[in-house]
Amino acid sequence: MPKSLRSFLEECRREIPNEVVHITKEVDPAHYDVTAIIKHLGAMKKFPILVFDRPRNLHGQVSNEFKLVMNCEISQRKAQIALGVPRQTDRTRMAEVCLEREEHRIPPIVVDKKSAPVKEVVKKGGDVDLYELPIMRHHYMDGGPYVVLSTITRDRKSGIYNCSYHRMEVKSKNKTALYASPRHLWKIFRDHEDNNRECPVATVLGHHPAYHMGACYSGPFEVSEFDIIGGYLQEPLRLTPSETFGEDLLIPADAEIVIEGALIPGKRIVEGPFGEAPGYLGPQRYTTCVHYEVRAVNYRKGGMYQSVITPEGDKPWMDLPREGAYLRRCREAVPGVTSVCKMGRHAHYNVFISMKKMSEGDPGRAAAAALTFDHTKNVFVFDDDIDVYNPTDILWALATRVQPHRQI
Ligand SMILES: Cc1cc2nc3c(=O)[nH]c(=O)nc-3n(C[C@H](O)[C@H](O)[C@H](O)COP(=O)(O)O)c2cc1C
């Protein structure tokens, strides 16, 4: 059976039965019920997978067609199950597993629509209604309800597929405002826009966590991220034609829900404010917020809608691929690098590196490599006796080993 969110939940029910909790009471995700439950549990250091069986949709009605699944991304154990590695696997090894999976890419295969669970229900054109989905408002003062998962685009010239996360504010039943920082999706969209063409697009709203981990890949533009996702899944990702663009835009056959349509050239929509990953309310944005016109919704019966609430703690499905990417980059500069920690909310800006130092220049070279990447502001480099995943180790080393006038 191909890997899917359902196969992952089955595995979790077997391996960590107390970590899969069904909420059978009605909840209203658009009015913070789900946020409140997650925050209260988090304050108790509890991060079970939450399956909301009776979420309201954006019409305010209990959804008969969709469930809402949250928290699949939190905890090391769940990431171990997603990657299929033993529970003893430590964090550095897990980041290395991510690097290995990215190296051992597996190309996707195409299946016809009849063999694709995501085609069990298809709504197109005037029947498209995003308000039927149990979409969340994440935080107080967010501009509106938001979809937060990964989006598929395709380079016009090479045909290479890109997958990347982009929040999108739902503006009407078939319109969202997608926020794109100047990375690969933006490059692909702008190339279409410069040629006055619509940019085909699809967004996966539920899949196996290994799919989502692969979609976090940060690497060269030329690499097809469906191959990377195959590496993470350890099997070919099954794809099927989209409704809007047929074979020209393939979508994951075993996803729970996929919305698809076009990014419209020459149109921008105001989006935000939004409670952002670093823990602050971000401003409204405009110039890089693109009009995403949704033209079809594909879903499995009983579709499990997923979202991620912006990270507060460790979110291995995002942090691990990122740690792998830092490990790759820092080891290119300094082979003796042993670990790179990028986990937790502060890790958006802080990087903790440990290494077996072989020359005096090594720490500076590793730090410089880390600073060229992502949002890094502060880099801390330690000897390899320090566990960079342990805050007490870090504070002890900073207190006893740093000579600020010489080393900062
Ligand atoms: C949960 C989550 C939400 C994100 N939201 C956005 C977003 O709204 N806009 C954006 O440009 N990047 C966002 N990112 C970051 C990009 O998805 C990430 O940098 C991605 O690796 C870029 O892919 P690329 O290297 O293929 O361009 C988000 C990442 C995660 C994990």
Image (tube, rainbow, N blue to C red):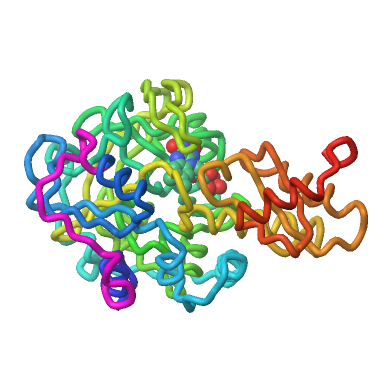
Identity of the residue drawn at 28% across and 41% down: 35
- The boundaries of the magenta stretch are 13-34
The quarter of the displayed image where residue 339 is located: bottom right
The quadrant of the picture occupied by the N terminus is: bottom left
In this rendering, is residue 215 above or below 37?
below
Identity of the residue drawn at 25% across and 39% down: 136
Is 20 on the left-hand or right-hand side of 346?
left
Q: Position of residue 91 (x, y in %)?
A: 57, 65
Identity of the residue drawn at 81% across and 59% down: 334
30 in the magenta segment: yes
Q: Position of residue 348 (x, y in %)?
A: 57, 42
The total of numbered circles placed on residues is 0
The quadrant of the picture occupied by the C terminus is: top right
Question: Which residue occupies the foreground of this view, 68 or 173?
Answer: 68
Is 336 on the left-hand or right-hand side of 339?
right
Q: In this orientation, does residue 215 appear? A: no
In this rendering, is residue 199 above or below 339?
above
